[in-house]
Amino acid sequence: MRAFIVAASPLARAGLKNILSVRGVEVVGSVPDIELVADQLADAEANIVLVDASGEQFETVLGSIRRLELASESAIIILADHPAPGWLAEAVQAGVGAVLSAEASPERGSVSARGLTSLVRQKREKRM
């Protein structure tokens, strides 16, 4: 499984890379801004795009996901803190596969290899 990370903070990118690597996920790239992901995503051949949206405007993140058509090729997982009511439905409509709490600790297994594999499998089945 191959993942691409979008997180503004270099510390967050490093932490997410570590969490994914421990779970057997190969991190194939990372960028600080979702607007930069489209240029690198095709070459990276990522199954998963993990977006740290904590502290970001949810509408802006979802708008970028839609406009860049990120969900058409990869399973999108968003880490968010306190999404507004109704935001989850909008995320699903934009093609997001999962919204996880940005506050969840790695020990709780919020990003599990089994869950990631399931999302990738669902994405493949939808394309067929």
Image (cartoon, rainbow, N blue to C red):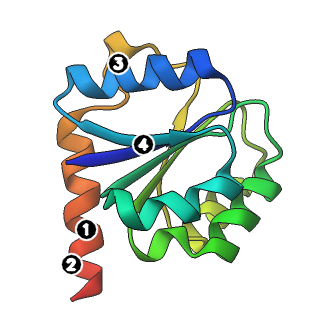
Q: Counting other residues with Cα less than 10 Å from the Cα at mark 3, is it few (<14), some (14-19), or many (20 or more)?
A: some
Q: Counting other residues with Cα less than 10 Å from the Cα at mark 1, is it few (<14), some (14-19), or many (20 or more)?
A: few
| x and y percentages locating residue 37 in the rendered image | 57, 56
The dot on residue 29 is 4
| x and y percentages locating residue 51 in the rendered image | 56, 43
Q: Which amino acid does label 1 sit on?
A: Gln
The dot on residue 92 is none
Residue at 30% in and 70% down: 123
Do callouts 1 and 3 mark residues in contact (Cβ within 8 Å)? no
Closer to the N terminus: mark 4 or mark 3? 3
On the rendered structure, is 54 left or right of 102?
A: right
Residue at 25% in and 43% down: 115
| x and y percentages locating residue 6 in the rendered image | 57, 42
Query: Can you tell which of label 4 and label 2 is closer to the viewer?
Result: 4
Residue at 19% in and 64% down: 121
Quote the CA–CA distance across marks 2 and 1. 5 Å
Looking at the image, residue 97 lies above or below residue 3: below
Do callouts 2 and 1 mark residues in contact (Cβ within 8 Å)? yes
Looking at the rendered structure, the secondary structure element under dot 4 is strand
Do callouts 3 and 2 mark residues in contact (Cβ within 8 Å)? no
Q: Mark 2 points at which residue?
A: 125
Closer to the N terminus: mark 3 or mark 2? 3
The dot on residue 18 is 3
Query: Can you tell which of label 1 and label 3 is closer to the viewer?
Result: 3
Closer to the N terminus: mark 4 or mark 1? 4
